[in-house]
């Protein structure tokens, strides 16, 4: 059966096309060695900044809703299996996509779960691996194409119906069929720096659960790289936006985001401590 990966990229407000392109280049560099494991890679170019590339099907979209872009692009996919990745979900080891496709021979849905949202279902209940969850995640979600296409899918949050997070409605509708489901673990290990102290921990995970332990999964969600790239560009402009960023962003998150933006763009700031960079390279060696 054929398989497709779909990844929505966006020209972030307040950043140059060059800066937005840097994230695409970083993503592609890491997934390139895995492309022979799938039949197609569909990249949504929302903002016209991604060039045509031999290995990629570039789907041009205006600068519209991230979720609308996904809704419209899934209609174009002819493959039997669909894998959706966020633009800052990095596949850094071969075999990850191959295993997901293998899992889809038996399971209808294979996905990471998130703890935000309001959906309840037996698949989302607390278990020995992690605490209670509330929705499927668009940063690593896979299913059979005919499974998602049987519902009136819409990735857009629908707060009027009580679905305040993306994919909440899809989670509710898919799980109402009780499809065979496999949950993927989520690597949330994060390096933080605050007031001279370094902290390496599994962000938003319960230490008493099995999945708290560090795992080398071959994939990692960087989280909020649109904000990171905006911050990074504002730093070099030293404009009012940068002043506001410094005012409202906690130091630990500012440094975390700028450190990733430095790696993605190749441009270094004076904000990230050298010791943090050293530890970052040690903890996330796959990124370098």
Image (cartoon, grey):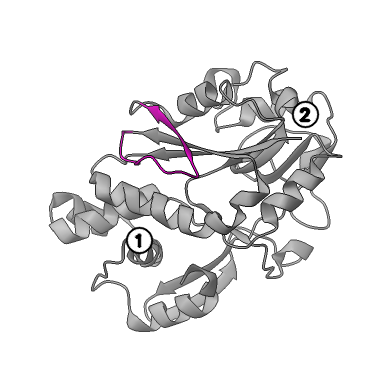
N-terminal of the pair, mark 1 or mark 2, is: 2
Total numbered labels: 2
Magenta span dominant secondary structure: loop
* Figure check: 39 above or below 31: above
Residue at point 42%, 74% (across, down): 193
- Residue at the spot 62% in from the left edge and 41% down from the top edge: 137
Residue 249 screen position, x and y as percent: 33, 57
Label disc, if present, on residue 36 of the rendered structure: none
Q: Which residues are magenta?
A: 47-61
Question: How many C-alpha atoms fall within 10 Å of the one at disc 1: few (<14), some, or many (≥20)?
Answer: many
Going 65% across and 41% down the picture, which residue do you hit? 141
Secondary structure under tag 2 reads helix
Tell me if I can see residue 200 in this picture.
yes
Q: Which mark is residue 175?
A: 2
Q: Label 1, on which residue?
A: 261
In reply to whether residue 53 is colored magenta, the answer given is yes
Residue farthest toward the front in the current orientation of the protein = 54
Q: Where in the figure is residue 245, as x and y percent of width and height?
A: 26, 54
Secondary element under disc 1, as helix, strand or loop, is helix
Where is residue 5 shown, x and y percent of the image? 59, 40
Q: Is residue 209 visible?
A: no
Where's the N terminus, which quadrant? top right
Nearer to us of marks 1 and 2 is 1
Answer left or right for 152 relative to 210: left
Toward the viewer: 130 or 69? 69
Distance between mark 1 and mark 2 Cα atoms: 36 Å
Residue 183 locus on image (x, y percent): 76, 47
* Residue at the (26%, 44%) spot, across then down: 17
Q: Quadrant of residue 84?
A: top right
């Amino acid at each position: 059966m054929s398989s497709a990966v779909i990844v929505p990229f966006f020209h972030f407000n307040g950043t140059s096309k060059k800066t937005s392109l840097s994230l695409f280049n970083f993503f592609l560099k890491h997934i390139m060695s895995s492309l022979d494991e799938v039949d197609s890679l569909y990249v949504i170019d929302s903002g016209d900044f991604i060039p045509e590339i031999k290995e990629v099907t570039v789907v041009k979209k205006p600068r519209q809703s991230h979720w609308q872009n996904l809704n419209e692009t899934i209609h174009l996919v002819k493959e039997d299996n669909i894998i959706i990745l966020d633009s800052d979900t990095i596949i850094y080891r071969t075999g990850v996509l191959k295993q997901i496709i293998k899992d889809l021979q038996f399971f209808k849905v294979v996905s990471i779960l998130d703890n935000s949202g309001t959906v309840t279902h037996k698949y989302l209940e607390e278990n020995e691996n992690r605490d209670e969850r509330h929705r499927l995640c668009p940063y690593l979600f896979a299913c059979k194409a005919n499974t998602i296409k049987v519902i009136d899918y819409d990735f857009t949050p629908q707060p009027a119906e009580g679905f305040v997070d993306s994919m909440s409605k899809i989670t509710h509708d898919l799980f109402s069929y009780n499809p065979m489901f496999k949950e993927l673990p989520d690597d949330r290990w994060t390096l933080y720096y605050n007031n001279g102290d370094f902290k390496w921990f599994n962000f938003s995970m319960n230490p008493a659960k099995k999945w708290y332990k560090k795992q080398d999964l071959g994939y990692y969600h960087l989280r909020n790289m649109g904000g990171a790239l905006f911050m990074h560009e504002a730093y070099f402009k030293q404009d009012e936006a940068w002043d506001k960023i410094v005012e409202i962003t906690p130091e630990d998150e500012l440094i975390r985001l700028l450190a990733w933006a430095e790696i993605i763009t190749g441009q270094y700031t004076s904000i990230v401590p050298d010791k943090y960079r050293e530890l970052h390279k040690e903890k996330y060696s796959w990124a370098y």
